[in-house]
Amino acid sequence: MNELQDLYREVILDHNRSPRNFGELDDADRIVEGVNPLCGDKMTLYLKLDGDKVEDVRFTGTGCAISVASSSLMTERIKGATTTESLELFERIHDMLAAPDFDVATANADLEKLAALSGVREYPTRVKCASLAWHALKNALTGSEAKVTTE
Ligand code: FES
């Protein structure tokens, strides 16, 4: 288990050090802002759709390592996915982060690098850090440009 935790930690650190898809997207179809009032950290998600596909996705903002890594991992995973696949992934990650009966050991195989976020389950305040980007994604996918807050 320690080896796995080390791997997860390395994924988080890597995505925090070198966030993927960081920056604004000039021709975004949807822009959603997210804030974590606990710490004041903010992120903005930019989504460009091509029909039912996520053609491009980028983000900006400041946050802790978990929040930046979560945004980075999310954008990496959903670029090129359909909106339906992306919403299903939102539900999976939501369960992974917060559902009491989610079985981390058996359910994580196909989540690949995203499984690195499962470590925050033990820390309720960190769950908010990890889930901010995903709630912004859900709003962007469903056409709601309402600001997202973790409270
Ligand atoms: Fe602010 Fe994690 S401490 S988003």
Image (cartoon, helix red, strand yellow):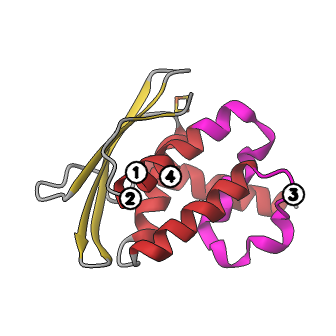
Instruction: Report the amino acid beneath label 1.
Output: Asn
Disc 2 versus disc 3: nearer the observer:
2
Instruction: Report the amino acid beneath label 4.
Output: Trp
- Closer to the chain start, of discs 2 and 3, is 3
SS type, badge 2: loop
Q: For the N terminus, which image quadrant?
A: bottom right
Tell me the residue that label 3 is attached to: 101
Residue 78 in picture, x, y percent from top left: 43, 70
State left or right for residue 71 relative to residue 126. left
Q: Residues within 10 Å of mark 4 (few under 14, many from 20)?
A: many
SS type, badge 4: helix
- Closer to the chain start, of discs 1 and 4, is 4
Give the magenta-colored segment's residue range.
99-128
Q: Residues within 10 Å of mark 2 (few under 14, many from 20)?
A: few
* Dot 1 beta carbon under 8 Å from ligand 1: no
Residue extending furthest toward the left: 26
Residue 124 in picture, x, y percent from top left: 73, 34
Tell me the residue that label 1 is attached to: 139
Instruction: Determine which of the numbered discs, if any, sits on residue 142 in the image.
Output: 2
Mark pair 2, 1: CA separation: 5 Å
For the point 44% across and 27% down, the residue is 41
Mark pair 2, 4: CA separation: 12 Å
Instruction: Report the amino acid beneath label 3.
Output: Asp
